[in-house]
Amino acid sequence: MKNINHQTSETISEVEKYICLCNNKLTNGVGVRKLKVTDYKNYISLLSQLTEVGNITKEIFTDRLREMEQNRYLYLYVMYNKRTDELIASGTVYIEPKFIHGCSKVGHIEDIVVNNNYRGKKYGQSIIKMLVKIAHIVGCYKVTLACKKRNVDFYEKCQFKQEGYEMVARL
């Protein structure tokens, strides 16, 4: 039977090694790291380029970030300008433990956004590739995402394909 423990020190170490490798490969003063409390204004601004964010105070942001950091199934990373600390792109992969496929896992990519000032430079493809690799490292058998029709071509360039239909119940 497969080891169904999501995060062993070995998988954490492998993800950290992979992030270091990504940082070594990135050029033009771009880095990748986990989101930090000091990213508050930058991150809210970046997310607002994706969707409605709402009124989030620094205290609420900090509390939510701490909550997310405690979630062993959530990997949220940002790409940033090392010189200015400006956020370039962000994305999240959530790991869902399953009973099917021998107690395997599925990765769900969420909240992909690239700063308007950096679009067209393949940062979106880079963050998607990174999140897919993290999902692979932690043992996912597939990665899914939902997107608007206008973004299908972009995700197809990232090796995703349309499969099935997304259904939503807005609450």
Image (cartoon, rainbow, N blue to C red):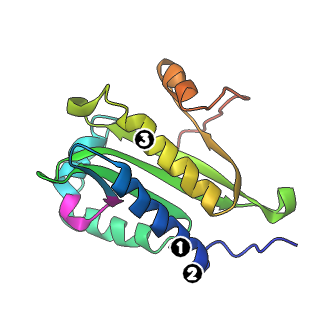
Q: Which mark is residue 70?
A: none
How crowded is the residue under tag 1: few (<14 C-alpha within 10 Å), some, or many (20+)?
A: some
Q: Is residue 72 left or right of residue 45?
A: right
How crowded is the residue under tag 2: few (<14 C-alpha within 10 Å), some, or many (20+)?
A: few
In this figure, which residue is indicated by the disc labeled 3? 126
In this figure, which residue is indicated by the disc labeled 1? 12
Q: Residue at x 48, y 61 (%)?
A: 18
Q: Which of the 4 image quarters holds residue 126?
A: top left
Mark 2 or mark 3: name the one nearer the start of the chain: 2
Mark 1 lies on a secondary structure that is helix
Q: Residue at x 77, y 74 (%)?
A: 3
**Marks 2/3: CA distance?**
26 Å
Mark 1 or mark 3: name the one nearer the start of the chain: 1
Q: Nearer the viewer, residue 168 or 100?
A: 100
Q: Is residue 114 left or right of residue 70?
A: left
Q: Which residues are magenta?
A: 33-39
Whether 123 is drawn above or below 93: the answer is: above
Q: Residue at x 59, y 77 (%)?
A: 10
Pointer 1 with pointer 2, Cβ within 8 A: yes
Pointer 1 with pointer 3, Cβ within 8 A: no
**Marks 1/2: CA distance?**
5 Å
Q: Amino acid at mark 1?
A: Ile
Expressed as whole percent of the image width and height from the top left, the position of residue 109 reads: 54, 46
In this figure, which residue is indicated by the disc labeled 2? 9
**Can I make out residue 9 in this image?**
yes
Mark 3 lies on a secondary structure that is helix
Expressed as whole percent of the image width and height from the top left, the position of residue 50 reads: 34, 35
Q: Residue at x 43, y 67 (%)?
A: 68
16 falls in the magenta region: no
**Marks 1/3: CA distance?**
21 Å
